[in-house]
Image (cartoon, helix red, strand yellow):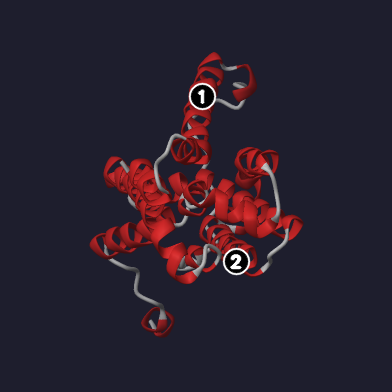
Amino acid sequence: MSELSHARPMPSSRQTFWLVAIAIFFLAANMRSPLAALGPVVPMVQQSLGIGESHIGWLGALPMLMFALGSLISPAIGKRFGLENTLIASLIAITLGIVFRSIWASWLPFLFATLLFSLAIGFTNTLAAPVIKQRTPEHIALMTSIYSLTMTLFAGSVAGLVDPLATHVGWKWMRLGSSHHIGNGSSNPIKETATPKTVSVWTAPLAWQLAIFMGLQSLLFYTIVSFLPSIWMDKGLTPVQAGHMATI
């Protein structure tokens, strides 16, 4: 009885729902904004860092490779250290990457910082869904919708606001975001799925179909995010107008 009296009470299902909803909201808000912010201020970045179009192309392409790497290795790390702990570490890495990218005014440190938070975002891309499934199994569709909606809205809003903010406070400092801890820091391992162990994802046709579909979707999205504002500016729109178009 004495041990039970000192045990920490478990949160109710309603408390868990709102904790996860708030955590997913802040998590998703930081997962696309750092990348969407670059497109409308490409001319400022090029002038400040003294780089050309090829460097901007690398800034658009390399984060996708980091997403892939993070997605590949994050399940094993999440299983070893716990989902929430791994996500907290990923959010810290995202924050550090954004801060470093904002204070280093040269090409290689800027690229390194971009790769750092991109790799961390790759982790969050993979591990957010298991957290939703474990913590709120009765509200998977709703939580996933909040997650996807928040990512899209914040990415679009940043694209429209980045140039006016950059004009007033500088293109580097306006991208400093905030990241928040998710969960209670417990080390919950990833639960085993019902898929038989004899089935390999590498030989499953459906897995490859989904991978190709999501890869093409990401190719289209990030091509638009990286280059469309610059194309609009080349066609005569102001940076503010190009940012508004990207938001829409």
Could you say which disc has been placed on residue 24 in the image?
none
Discs 1/2, front: 2
Q: Is residue 83 left or right of residue 50?
A: left
Q: Is residue 220 above or below residue 238?
A: above
Q: Looking at the image, which residue is at 53% across and 43% down?
A: 126
In the rendered view, does 115 fall on the left or right side of 224?
A: right
Dots 1, 2 in contact, CB < 8 A: no
Give the answer, above or below, for where 31 lies relative to 54: below
On the question of residue 147 being in view, the answer is yes
Disc 2 target residue: 102
* Horizontal arrangement in the rendering, residue 85 relative to residue 233 (left or right): right
Disc 1 residue type (three-letter):
Leu
Q: Is residue 205 above or below residue 99?
A: above
Relative vertical location of residue 101 with respect to residue 215 in this rendering, above or below: below
Mark 1 or mark 2: name the one nearer the start of the chain.
2
For the question of whether residue 183 can be seen, the reply is: no
Disc 1/disc 2 C-alpha distance (Å): 30 Å
Q: Given the current orientation, which residue lies at the most extreme right position?
A: 108
